[in-house]
Image (cartoon, rainbow, N blue to C red):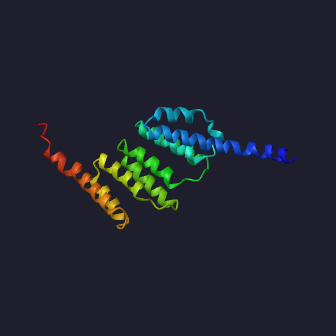
């Protein structure tokens, strides 16, 4: 009787374990910058049965790595629709995907959505939003975001980002020769 009960319990655990293994495989592909391979693994999962948010997060990261922010945001929307809990990690992955393509308004909106959802953005999430502002030439927005960040956290990293944002948005364009 005991072996029969164990056999009945294992099928319920296997999908979660298999999904965790899939998320780890996708994460390994992402760390090796093999984004297409990570997405190929994700494509093998029937989305209706995905119960591991990490699979979605790794797919968002892969789309971001490929410079596909729209697809990353579609995957984030699918994660939202799945009713799995959204974490700061999932928001940060989507914000980073926006940063790769200068989608600064969406990045800032996601950062605010995380706050509205009761999550406190960390330095990683804020730096991803700062990068989106920098790439979009939005130094004013970057400065506003910096003012909102907790001053005790990663001040050295933040200072270097401020210099980068200001340099690339204000100083560097003035040093370039005029096209006229």
Tell me where residue 49 appears, x and y as whole percent. Answer: 66, 40
Q: Where residue 160 sits: x, y (%)? A: 27, 56
Q: Quick one: quadrant of the C terminus?
A: top left
Q: Visible in this render: residue 69? A: no
Q: Quadrant of residue 121?
A: bottom left
Q: Position of residue 104 (x, y in %)?
A: 36, 48
Left-right relation of 56 to 130: right
As rendered, which of 35 and 108 lies closer to the eye?
35
157 sits to left or right of 114? left
**Towards the viewer: 145 or 92:** 92
Residue at image location 46% in from the left, 47% down from the top: 93
- Pick out the residue farthest to the right: 1
Regarding residue 80, the answer to whether it shows in the image is: yes
Residue under the image location 40 percent in, 58 percent down: 123
Residue placed most toward the observer, 30 or 61: 30
Residue 97 in the image: x percent, y percent? Answer: 42, 44
Name above or below for residue 70 compared with residue 147. above
On the rendered structure, is 55 left or right of 163? right
In this rendering, would 144 be left or right of 75? Answer: left
- Toward the bottom, the furthest residue is 152
Q: How many numbered marks appear?
A: 0
């Amino acid at each position: 009787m005991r072996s029969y009960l164990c056999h009945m319990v294992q099928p319920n655990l296997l999908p979660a374990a298999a999904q965790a293994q899939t998320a780890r495989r996708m994460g390994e592909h992402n760390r090796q910058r093999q984004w297409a391979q990570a997405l190929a693994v994700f494509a093998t999962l029937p989305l209706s049965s995905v119960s591991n948010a990490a699979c979605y997060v790794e797919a968002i990261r892969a789309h971001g790595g490929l410079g596909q922010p729209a697809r990353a945001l579609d995957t984030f929307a699918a994660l939202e629709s799945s009713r799995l809990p959204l974490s700061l990690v999932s928001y940060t992955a989507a914000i980073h995907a926006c940063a790769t393509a200068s989608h600064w308004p969406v990045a800032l909106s996601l950062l605010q959505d995380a706050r509205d959802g009761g999550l406190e953005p960390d330095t990683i999430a804020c730096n991803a939003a700062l990068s989106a502002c920098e790439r979009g030439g939005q130094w004013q927005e970057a400065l506003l975001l910096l003012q909102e960040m907790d001053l005790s956290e990663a001040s050295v990293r933040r200072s270097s980002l401020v210099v980068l944002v200001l340099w690339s948005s204000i100083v560097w364009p003035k040093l370039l020769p005029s096209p006229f």
